[in-house]
């Protein structure tokens, strides 16, 4: 029972980190209808910058530098590449991001080589005792910070001018423009927020269970993509819910891998995608995604 | 040179002209010419109307002014748009709004996920000055008390009339000096149209110039001082509204009055077609707490045109959706001949020859008109996946027969000239005809037309009526026409059923129905405050 509990807590906490990454996907999708495939690479990039600077700057300052670096890259992608596309329809732009993802990912793997960089986070290997089980401090810190960021984001999204403009632009870009909303600014703001979320999530994801920045890290982060889809690509709340679902699925599949060995070893790595298939079969727009409404 | 300078001096920047459009040429994708040298002026503090059929270039004109042309793949080939003496060329929509020009888009386009308050807030962001924002909000709530009552409701929950109010109110939040209105009366019941007209006049009195594009020419000419008539991208006519309203050309083309369709067209022998009647018995369906149809029974005689009319939300579209199997009735049944439609799946209903058109055009925009019509023939084709894919001789032969039938149908509905155009590139009126053509391509025994003339001018409606009548006399199909437009229906149908609140309130020949007091109060109503409130409530209750 205590094993189950510790898996549950650990699953939920990693779930919020997945949720953070998924939120970045969703926010760009809502603002621009672009499915941003560079997102996982950006998360890794931000974490990599933190990994390379924390020794000289200390963790917190390095984290800020990492976030700033990811924001710069994201804004460059939006302004330089997507802003100048000849056919700015979301489909074309999404495919451009696949190309960018390959570019950024390849360069990062080249830089990282076969090293594994630590992230210098202040939590180290400490554990907290909850009931009869032990939970790594990083997990708790990750969950707490992720929840704080998510709540903050939800408040801003709900009540700020930017949030209202963003939701309007997401629903009907042309009508929003006609009411004076600057679509370019909404889009840039979304890429900025996504860059910050990606770095934050990347760092937490790779401290534990990721075990540092290595050239396999991007693949692991990609597990957050199903989280966004499961929640519904255009639902911020759904991203968080999807993240928690994926987090628990992965953790339980890994925790009970002996019991489900008949499915094959390492099935937990595929688990988010299996969950995604099942959800999409039943609800094609994800759990909380808006249905394409069509009046006949 | 000298002459040119003189000309500039005469027409040069002046504070009396709010908007000046000069020699405007606009094209889409570099090919389709939408505007072809339009000159137009909106004097300060005035209301100017732009009339014209679908495809005349009205939308393109508004898009050019508001800066959204490029979003639709259009561009200015030549000409300028000046607002208060400054050029609007190359300014993006948000910049145009900040300059003081705002457009209320066609079809309202309010943000359904946002509350009424948030809808207004989005538009208020364009105004930097906090006090000005507050003043604008107060003015909007003053103008539309209804919006103040529902300020925390989500936009999608408002009725059509309330949504139009929100769309106008939202635009006013930007503190504009020029208001562009694109078809504000579209889809509204007549008494609400009257209310919107009063509101526009009110807004104008507060010192905001208005440029209004309308299908409802009577309404537009009533409130505007000056009007332009666009025809295929040019100004065909302009003048004082009063004079235009009295001119015979305008009267025939846009005001129409009573549509009188030649009822004795030369009648060729109707084709061999099984003329079956439709019998609707005690039909009821509810959505949540709302009764969309409440114990409705009527009969459609074989081979006739039968109209179903009623205000917004009366249950007209629901009825069509029950007839085609999209919705399942809670009670009652529908018999077509001896087939029980209420017990069949949509594709089975299509299979026995029941076909429909859609109110909000549902074509494949990237396919040619011919292919859209061929789609209608699907149920009649036999060549399978491999036969067609491998272009087997029998498949090609079948294709040719169907293609020649499609050409006949195109001829009948007046689409012969545009068979190879992409359906999405056609003007709205033509797309409505493609809808009709596709439905006819299925060789229907029962044809259901859902608002075939919504958003059309009087002359276009007349054309549509003529085509429908011709189809009926040549093919002898039983038809059910659902419409908003009274005159259209009165001239066309042999029998009319009136729905209100989901209940049947009248059923009979057009003349009788028109005199029925229940119909007059439900449908035409007055335009006093109480009637407007009642109309809104009726809409909301049945939405």
Image (cartoon, rainbow, N blue to C red):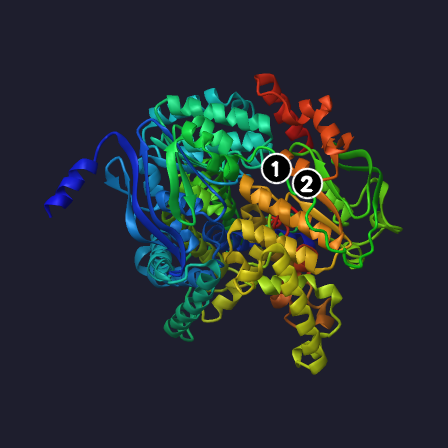
Q: Quadrant of residue A199?
A: bottom left
Taking B403 as reference, is B251 left or right? left
> x%, y% of residue A161?
41, 37
> x%, y% of residue A148?
49, 43
Q: Quote the CA–CA distance across marks 2 and 1.
A: 8 Å
Of B16 and A32, the residue lying toward us: B16
Q: Are marks 2 and 1 on the same chain?
A: yes
**Mark 1 — residue?**
B259
Quadrant of the rendering where the C terminus of chain B is positioned: top right
Label 1: which secondary element: loop
Q: Residue at x 72, y 54 (%)?
A: B474
In the depicted structure, whether residue B336 falls above or below residue B205? below
> Residue B180, which numbered label?
none
- Name of the residue lying farthest toward the right: B338
Of A9 and A202, the residue lying toward us: A202
> x%, y% of residue B459?
54, 42
Chain label for disc 2: B
Asked if labels 1 and 2 touch by Cβ distance under 8 angstroms, the answer is yes
Label 2: which secondary element: helix
């Amino acid at each position: 029972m205590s094993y189950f509990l510790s898996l549950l807590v650990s699953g939920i906490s990693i779930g919020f980190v997945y949720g953070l990454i998924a939120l970045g996907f969703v926010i760009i999708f809502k603002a621009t209808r672009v499915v941003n495939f560079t997102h996982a690479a950006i998360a890794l990039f931000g974490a990599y910058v933190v990994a390379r600077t924390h020794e000289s700057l200390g963790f917190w300052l390095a984290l800020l530098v990492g976030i700033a670096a990811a924001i710069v890259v994201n804004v460059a992608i939006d302004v330089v590449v997507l802003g100048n596309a000849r056919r700015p329809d979301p489909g074309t732009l999404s495919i451009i991001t696949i190309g960018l993802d390959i570019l950024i990912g390849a360069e990062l793997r080249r830089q990282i080589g076969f090293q594994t960089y630590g992230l210098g986070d202040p939590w180290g290997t400490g554990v907290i005792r909850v009931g009869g089980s032990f939970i790594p401090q990083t997990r708790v810190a990750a969950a707490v910070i992720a929840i704080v960021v998510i709540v903050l984001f939800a408040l801003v999204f709900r009540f700020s001018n930017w949030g209202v403009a963003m939701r309007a632009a997401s629903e009907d870009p042309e009508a929003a423009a006609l009411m004076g909303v600057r679509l370019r600014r909404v889009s840039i703001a979304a890429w900025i927020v996504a860059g910050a979320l990606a770095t934050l999530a990347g760092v937490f994801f790779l401290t534990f269970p990721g075990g540092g920045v290595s050239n396999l890290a991007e693949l692991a982060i990609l597990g957050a993509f199903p989280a966004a889809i499961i929640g519904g690509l255009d639902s911020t709340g759904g991203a968080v819910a999807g993240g928690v679902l994926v987090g628990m699925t992965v953790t339980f599949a890994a925790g009970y891998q002996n019991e489900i060995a008949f499915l094959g070893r390492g099935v937990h790595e595929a688990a988010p995608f299996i969950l995604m298939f099942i959800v999409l079969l039943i609800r094609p727009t994800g759990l909380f995604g808006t249905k394409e409404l069509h009046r006949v | 040179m000298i002459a040119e300078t003189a000309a500039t001096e005469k027409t040069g920047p002046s504070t009396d002209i709010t908007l000046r459009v000069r020699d405007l040429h606009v094209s889409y994708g570099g090919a389709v010419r939408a505007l072809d040298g339009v000159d137009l002026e909106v004097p300060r503090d005035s209301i100017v109307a732009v009339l014209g059929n679908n495809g005349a270039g009205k939308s393109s004109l508004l898009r050019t002014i508001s800066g959204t042309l490029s979003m639709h793949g259009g561009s200015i080939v030549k000409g300028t748009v000046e607002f208060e003496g400054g050029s609007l060329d190359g300014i993006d929509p948000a910049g145009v709004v900040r300059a003081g020009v705002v457009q209320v888009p066609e079809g309202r386009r309010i943000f359904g996920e946002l509350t009424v308050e948030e809808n207004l807030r989005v538009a208020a962001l364009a105004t930097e000055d906090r006090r000005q924002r507050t003043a604008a909000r107060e003015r909007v709530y003053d103008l539309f008390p209804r919006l103040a009552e529902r300020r925390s409701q989500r936009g999608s929950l408002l009725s059509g009339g309330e949504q139009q109010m929100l769309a106008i109110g939202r635009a006013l939040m930007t503190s504009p000096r020029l208001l562009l209105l694109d078809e504000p009366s579209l889809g509204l019941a007549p008494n609400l149209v009257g209310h919107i007209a009063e509101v526009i006049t009110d807004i104008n009195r507060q010192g905001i110039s208005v440029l209004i594009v309308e299908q409802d020419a009577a309404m537009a000419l009533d409130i505007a001082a000056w009007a332009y008539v666009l025809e295929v991208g040019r100004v065909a006519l302009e003048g004082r509204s009063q004079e235009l309203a009295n001119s015979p050309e305008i009267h025939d083309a846009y005001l129409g009055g009573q549509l009188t369709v030649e009822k004795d067209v030369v009648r060729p022998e109707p084709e061999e077609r099984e003329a079956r009647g439709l019998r609707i018995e005690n039909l009821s369906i509810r959505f949540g707490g709302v009764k969309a149809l409440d114990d409705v029974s009527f009969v459609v005689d074989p081979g006739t045109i039968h109209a179903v009319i009623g205000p917004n939300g009366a249950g007209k579209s629901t009825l069509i959706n029950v007839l085609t199997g999209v919705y399942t009735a809670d009670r009652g049944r529908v018999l077509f001949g001896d087939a029980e439609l209420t017990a069949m799946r949509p594709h089975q209903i299509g299979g026995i020859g029941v076909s429909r058109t859609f109110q909000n055009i549902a074509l494949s925009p990237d396919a040619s008109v011919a292919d859209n019509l061929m789609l209608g023939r699907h149920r009649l084709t036999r060549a399978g996946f491999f036969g067609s894919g491998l272009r087997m001789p029998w498949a090609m032969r079948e294709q040719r027969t169907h293609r020649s039938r499609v050409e006949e149908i195109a001829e009948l509905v007046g689409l012969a000239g545009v068979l190879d155009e992409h359906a999405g590139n056609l003007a709205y009126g033509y797309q409505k005809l493609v809808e009709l053509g596709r439905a006819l391509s299925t060789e229907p025994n029962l044809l259901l037309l859902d608002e075939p003339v919504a958003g059309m001018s009087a002359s276009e409606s007349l054309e549509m009526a003529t085509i429908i009548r011709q189809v009926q006399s040549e093919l002898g199909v039983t038809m059910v026409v659902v419409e908003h437009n009274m005159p259209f229906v009165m001239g066309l149908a042999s029998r009319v059923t009136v729905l209100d609140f989901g209940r049947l309130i009248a059923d009979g020949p057009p003349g009788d129905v028109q005199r029925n007091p229940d119909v007059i109060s439900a449908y035409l109503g007055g335009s006093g405050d109480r009637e407007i409130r009642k109309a809104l409530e009726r809409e909301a209750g049945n939405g």
